[in-house]
Amino acid sequence: MKTTLICFSGTGNSYYIAKRLCDQLGDCQVLMIPNLMHGDPIELTEQVGFVFPVYKGFPPNLVVHFIQEVFAKQDLSPIKYLFMVATRYMFQAYSFQAMDVVLKEAGALASYVNHVVMPDGYVPLMHAPTETKIDDLYAKAEQKIALIAKDVQNEAIHLPFRPPLSRLVINHLMEPIHRAFMDTALDFVVTEACTSCGLCYRMCPSANIDMVEGKPVFDRACTGCLGCYHRCPTQAIVFKQKVKEGRYPNPKSTYDQEYRT
């Protein structure tokens, strides 16, 4: 059975999970959400999975916007089995419940959800992971990926637990959190270490960066992934205010996606 994985990834965790799942599922394709936002028809298959990170307990704003603005307008009739896989470090909170609401509004219903614990690079709250921690979580992730792949092949049913007051929390918290993330990049400053390579411009999933006189300038449409911060080859993008230590370029993921030329 053919499978389409629709993926959003900032630092590469979700991309890695999607690629490894595809390897194990066989007849499978991975589509990256930033490449799908222009609204062209998408070739959906019998199995469709969403793979995405958890940002402060919810799916990233770009994932929600994609479902509302693009996915909802597609021919969903080929889909026989829809599933979700979230990457998270501490908790997935309301991410599956929020996705469930948005997908239902788009005319789709998920039959299976699961999560994979991965390293966290959200340095406003915690230090970047050590190499030992990264190795440990990646090893455990391989075991979880194999389990999820087997479940998907068997079209297992695994619905998300719905915490109390879920709809109330989603209705009143998800949008404010998404709005707050959209201003994340305004906390960045670019140092003299910048070499004008333009990688941040090319890899930004929300096209939130412009190059002005060879230097990145940030707008207010950030998705909060911190990919530019972690992947800058000279570490020229820094926070104006002190944050936790370290960077997470995540070479293990082999994530090298660029969305603009």
Image (cartoon, helix red, strand yellow):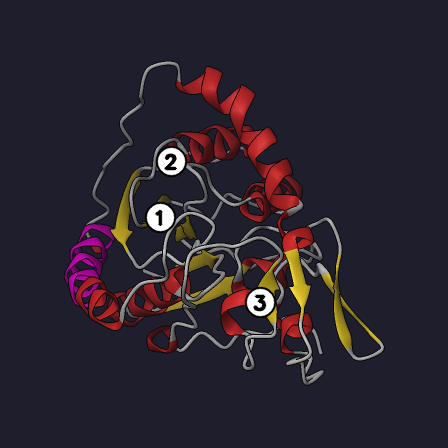
Q: Earlier in the sequence, mark 1 or mark 2?
A: 1
Q: Position of residue 186 (x, y in %)?
A: 69, 52
Q: Position of residue 114 (x, y in %)?
A: 27, 44
Viewer-nearest of discs 3 and 1? 3
- The residue stretch that appears in magenta: 139-152
> Which corner quadrant of the image does residue 29 belong to?
bottom left
The image quadrant where one finds the N terminus is bottom left
- Secondary element at tag 3: helix
Q: From the image, tell me which residue sits under label 2.
A: 96
Label 2: how many Cα within 10 Å (few below 14, some 14–19, many 20+): many
Q: Is residue 146 magenta?
A: yes
- Secondary element at tag 1: strand
Indicate which disc residue 86 carries. Answer: 1
Q: Position of residue 97 (x, y in %)?
A: 40, 30
Q: Is residue 90 above or below residue 161?
A: below
For the residues labelled 3 and 1, the Cα–Cα distance comes to 21 Å
The image quadrant where one finds the C terminus is bottom right
Q: Earlier in the sequence, mark 3 or mark 1?
A: 1
For the residues labelled 1 and 2, the Cα–Cα distance comes to 8 Å
Q: From the image, tell me which residue sits under label 3.
A: 228
Q: Is residue 145 magenta?
A: yes
Q: Nearer the viewer, residue 237 or 78?
A: 237
Viewer-nearest of discs 2 and 3? 3
For the residues labelled 2 and 3, the Cα–Cα distance comes to 26 Å
Q: Residue at x 31, y 37 (%)?
A: 111
Q: Residue at x 31, y 21 (%)?
A: 163
Q: Is residue 55 above or below residue 16?
A: above
